[in-house]
Amino acid sequence: MAIWKKKRNYFTLEPQGAPTVPPVLKPTIPEGLWHKCRVCEKIILQEELKKNWGICPKCGAYSRLCAKDRLGSVTDEATFREINGNIVGTNPLDFPNYDEKIAAVQESTGIKEGVITGYGRVGGVKVALAAMEPGFIMGSMGSAIGEKLASLVEFADFYHLPLIIFSASGGARMQEGIVSLMQMAKVSAALKRFSDHGNLYISVPTDPTTGGVTASFAMLGDIILAEPGTLIGFAGRRVIEGTINTKLPEDFQTAEFLLKHGFLDAVVRREEMKSTLNRLLRLHGYRS
Ligand SMILES: [Zn+2]
């Protein structure tokens, strides 16, 4: 009798029918309309943030800029012209799903490869410019990026234009294997010829710039500038700590740390980047 009773109690405790799940709360605001500042955590209109070149109007913190906005933040209005916008990479290793991944990122970013190259004016001075796209497979450097950058350096060399490159990268694009690594030498060689002809190259590594890009053209500038707090390094902090078995300083691989140790020439606020670039260009004899 006692066993039967226990059994009956057991069954009555079981939930009846399909388990009920609380309804998923869908946001009522269209995705991408609002932005939450990572520092002050205030909610800002995406549109307002874009107009302010990614600078939080509440606390002044920076959010990452896409390549188009980065170029827009330093060039005079409507002066930028893109070149080689149709260069795309291949899949030299037949890496599985790589073509599909590229197609998806092209769709989401609206650009064909992870860098925009061209020319425009900064405070009236004509310059050749490039900005890497952090949203394009982490700004990783594949063959198309190398080709576009090397072509831009040669373009600037031919027209005796000063060159400004805003890099942003997670390093080499592993899906392209050795072909990706070769881009470091290719762009660096073009920069050497550019430099030998007496031209000016200003490099601006942006947050984050790491791996093969740091190990090549991002650190080859005649002048190297970065925004406050920018992460610039080669290997990641944890990898280095594990290898040398030492605790690294808190500000390791930040723009401020690099400036202190001679890797950067100046830490420049985003609000002052355009005027600083213009001043440097004019100091080196470039005019409108
Ligand atoms: Zn803020």
Image (cartoon, grey):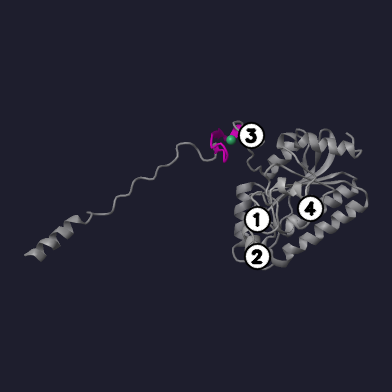
Kindly tell me whether mark 3's CB lies below 8 Å from ligand 1: yes
Mark 2 and mark 4 residues within 8 Å of each other at the beta carbon: no
Q: Quadrant of ligand 1?
A: top right
Labels 1 and 2: the sequence-earlier one = 2
Kindly tell me whether mark 2's CB lies below 8 Å from ligand 1: no
Q: Is residue 75 visible?
A: no
Q: CA distance from mark 2 to mark 3?
A: 36 Å
For disc 1, the neighbor class at 10 Å (few under 14, some 14 to 19, many from 20) is few
Labels 4 and 3: the sequence-earlier one = 3
The range drawn in magenta is 35-49
Q: Secondary structure at mark 3?
A: loop
Residue 117, position in %: x, y?
Answer: 77, 47
Q: Residue at x 85, y 38 (%)?
A: 280
Q: In which quadrant will I find the C terminus?
A: top right
Mark 4 and mark 3 residues within 8 Å of each other at the beta carbon: no
**In the visual, does 121 lie left or right of 30?**
right
Amino acid type for the residue under numbered disc 3: Gly
Labels 2 and 3: the sequence-earlier one = 3
Q: Residue at x 60, y 48 (%)?
A: 108
Please tell me which residue lies in front, 77 or 85. Answer: 77
For disc 3, the neighbor class at 10 Å (few under 14, some 14 to 19, many from 20) is some
| Disc 1: which residue | 248
